[in-house]
Amino acid sequence: MQGIKTLRDYDFKDKRVLIRADFNVTIKNGKITDATRIKAVLPTLDDLLKRGAKQLIIMSHLGRPEGKPDPESSLKPVAAALQALMKRNVAFCEDCIGYTLPKESLVVIENVRFHPEETSKNEEERKQFAKKIAHSAQAHIYVNDAFGSSHRKHASVYDIVKELPSCVGLLMEKEVEYLQRFISPPGTSVAILGGAKIEDKIDMILGLAQKYTAVVIGGGMVFTFYRAQGLSIGTSMVNADKVKDVQTLLSNQAYTSKILLPQQVVVTSLKDPKKKLKSLTPADYSTPQVVMNTAIPEGMIGLDVYPDQKSLDAIAHADTIYWNGPFGVFEVPDFMKGTAMVVDAISRNQKANVVAGGGDTLDALAKLKKELPISTGGGASSDLILFGDLPALKILRA
C-alpha cells in the first residue's frame, strides 16, 4: 500500500469515523442470503472500537436504485444483520445526509445511491454531495474499506477523500495485497469469466488474454459469442450491439486460441418470458435439455452452460486461477450444474493460487456450500488485476 495511509497512521481515540463499506448483499424476501460482505468489514470495525473511536458512521450502496429511494434497496436489513454480528446496538438513519446523529457508537446510514449525485458524471455534483456526506457525519477521519466499489469514481469512495483525512481499512489492505499475485501471474494461469452480460467485459477479456494462459468464458454472455460465430441461440439473451465487437475479438489470432467457450448448453422454454430468471420454479419452464451449442432449438432459452474438457483440463493444471461470475442461473437448482462444475474443478487443484470475486460469485459459493479464497469485489478485482491500480486508491495517494 505504498503512498496510502492505513489505520496504523491515525489516532482514533475519541474520533468520529466515517467508513465506506461494501454492503451490496443479496436480499430475498427481506432476508440477506449471504452475509460475507458484511462479515468482511467486521475486523476494521472491531479494530477502530478497540482504538477508542467514539462513533462509527457506516455508509454503503446496495443494488441499483437509480438515484432515488427504493425500499428494496434499503440498508435497514443490513443494519439489523450488523447488530446481530457485532452484538451491540446499531442505529439506522433514514438518509445518508441531513440526519441527526444518534447516540449509538455504531450507525448505518441509508443507501448513498438513493441520491443521483453519488454516481454522477459531473465532478462538481459529486464533490458537493461528498461535502454533504462529510458534514452530516461530523466525521474527523474517513476510512475506505469498500474494495468492491473502489473501481468507480463515485462520491463516497473518490471525492470524499478531499473532504477528510483518509486511509484504507483492514479489508481493503488485505484485498489489495492478496491480489498482487494475480496481476502478472507466473507459470500457467487461467481466468474464468461468467455472468449474464458482456457489455463491459470485452476489454476485460482482451486484457486477461494478454496476461493469462487461458480465458474460460461462461454465463449468459456466451450467447453473444455464439451469435458472433453465426450460431442460432433460440431466445437466449444476447447483447446485439456487441456482436461486432466480439467478432473483432475472435478475429485476433493472438488471443483466439486462449479464449475457451463451452460446447454444452442447458435449454428450456419459459411459460412467462417476462418472469425474473432468478425467481423461476419448475412450474415456470419445460423439462431442461442438454444440447450442443450448435443445436440450440428455436424458441428455447439457454440458462446454463457446462465448461468443456479443455477448460476443465486448463483449470486442473493451472498455477493461478482467477474466477469472476457464475456459469448459469445458479439460483435455480436445475441451472446450477455449470457453476458447480467450475467450483469442483477449482477445488480439486490444490497447488494453484486462487481467488473468486464478485457478488454473484460469492452468492453461488454460499448456495453450493463451498469455500474458496475470495475477493469481495468483482469489477474491482478484475480492474486491479488488469491495470494494477484503482481510482479510489489513486486518489488516496494524491
Image (cartoon, rainbow, N blue to C red):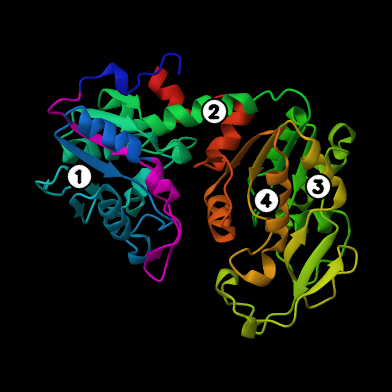
Q: In the rendered structure, find residue 343 and report the number of the disc placed on it.
A: 4
Of the two numbered discs 3 and 2 on the same chain, state the one appearing first in sequence: 2
Q: In the structure shown, which secondary structural element does the residue marked by tag 3 occupy?
A: helix
Q: In the structure shown, which secondary structural element does the residue marked by tag 1 occupy?
A: strand
- CA gap, disc 3 to disc 4? 10 Å
Q: Amino acid at mark 3?
A: Leu
Q: Are marks 2 and 1 in contact (CB under 8 Å)?
A: no
Residue where numbered disc 3 is placed: 312
Q: Amino acid at mark 4?
A: Val
> Start and end of the magenta stretch?
12-40
Classify 160 as above or below 346: above
| Residue positioned 86% across, 36% down in the render | 252
Q: Amino acid at mark 1?
A: Leu
- CA gap, disc 1 to disc 3? 46 Å
Of the two numbered discs 3 and 4 on the same chain, state the one appearing first in sequence: 3
Local crowd size for mark 4, using a 10 Å CA cut-off: few (<14), some (14–19), many (≥20): many
- CA gap, disc 3 to disc 2? 25 Å
Magenta segment: does it hold 100? no
Residue where numbered disc 2 is placed: 178
Q: In the structure shown, which secondary structural element does the residue marked by tag 4 occupy?
A: helix
Q: Residue furthest left?
A: 103
